[in-house]
Image (tube, rainbow, N blue to C red):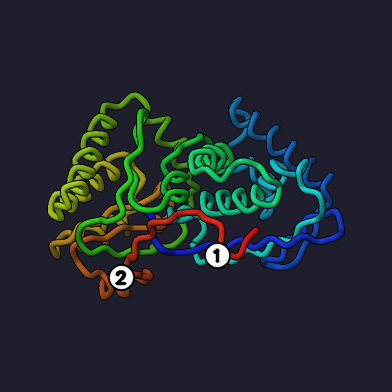
Amino acid sequence: MTISLYLRVSLTIIESPLIRILNPKPIEYSFETCRLIAQKIDQRYSDYLAGNILITSVLTQIDDLILYIFNRHIRDIPHGISLDLDSKIPIGGGFGSSSAIISALSLALSAITGKTLQKKEKLIDETSYIERLQHGKSGIIDSTAIVTGGIVYVNPSHTIKHENLPGEWWAINTGKPESSTGECVSFVDQYFSHSNIWTEFNAITNQMMDGVQKQDEEKVYSSIRTNQSLLQAIGVVPQSVARFIRSIENKGGSAKISGAGSVRGEQAGLVLVGGYNPQELAILYGYTCNKIKGEKNGTMLAENSC
């Protein structure tokens, strides 16, 4: 499900043959430096696949991801480019920030260079491919939701999109998790890769999607509660967040972590809450709370863009 928290990428052609990143403070990179950084990232990812380093050691500097995206287009960039990035999306908390920046910057660069990323399917593939550097694997759920917008159901054979989620929903930010998505994925792979619990995850996902298609609020809420219990079983829900979710359930609502969660610390990023207004409870826990307004368009070029 896509939440209406926005990220905007603005690109400006400049005469100097360099990449200028304006946020959080201006910094410039030559095209050659960009190429070298991208090569080192590819090498570190190979080292990760070989089991020599952790996924958190692949992207080591704040601009690594951005420069890697630029390098995918650098042969077709005729001049220098200045990047202005404005994001309202919390970083590293299950809100899809990495997919958002990858898809937005990739689409903007494709418009400048004439590459064929205008079709949603190609942009999803590109976003998923680059996101492997952040999470260790090329998954398509985040990239599909961010690129297409709306509520998406993804399985190996097809993708189903819906624009409306039945009921009322809130997004709770419990704080940035201490462990990255890649760490959580590695943890779950290590301990649950051969578990039968994934059959239960698949079944409850299908049940939830059936509730969405039929606009059955109670079925969706029930599916959320069951999904949360499975997430707790695989060890990615911190205790304080689990207590918050139990409080929501005790008041008749439903809640689940939405993202990788965390295998360390007390924050888990995004928690999705339905069927109960959690604003007062969120204040007690020190969490931020926002009513969810769905976003049905996904990643797109602004009307005045080239």
Q: Which mark is residue 23?
A: none
Reading the chain from its start, which is encountered first: label 2 or label 1?
1
Q: Residue 141, position in %: x, y?
A: 41, 42
The quarter of the displayed image where residue 35 is located: top right
Vertical placement of residue 100 versus 115, above or below = below
Which residue ends up furthest to the right in the rendered image? 16
| Residue 193 left/right relative to 80 | left
**SS for callout 2:** helix
Q: Visible in this render: residue 27?
A: yes
Q: Residue 153, position in %: x, y?
A: 32, 41
- Foreground residue, 54 or 215? 215
Amino acid at circle 2: Ala
Cα separation, mark 2 vs mark 1, equals 23 Å
Amino acid at circle 1: Ser
Can you identify the residue that label 2 sits on? 282
Q: Residue 300, position in %: x, y?
A: 52, 55
The quarter of the displayed image where residue 165 is located: bottom left
- Foreground residue, 169 or 195? 169
Q: Please tell me which residue is depicted at 39% across the width and 49% down the height of the picture.
A: 259
Q: Give the position of the C terminus as an image quadrant.
A: bottom right
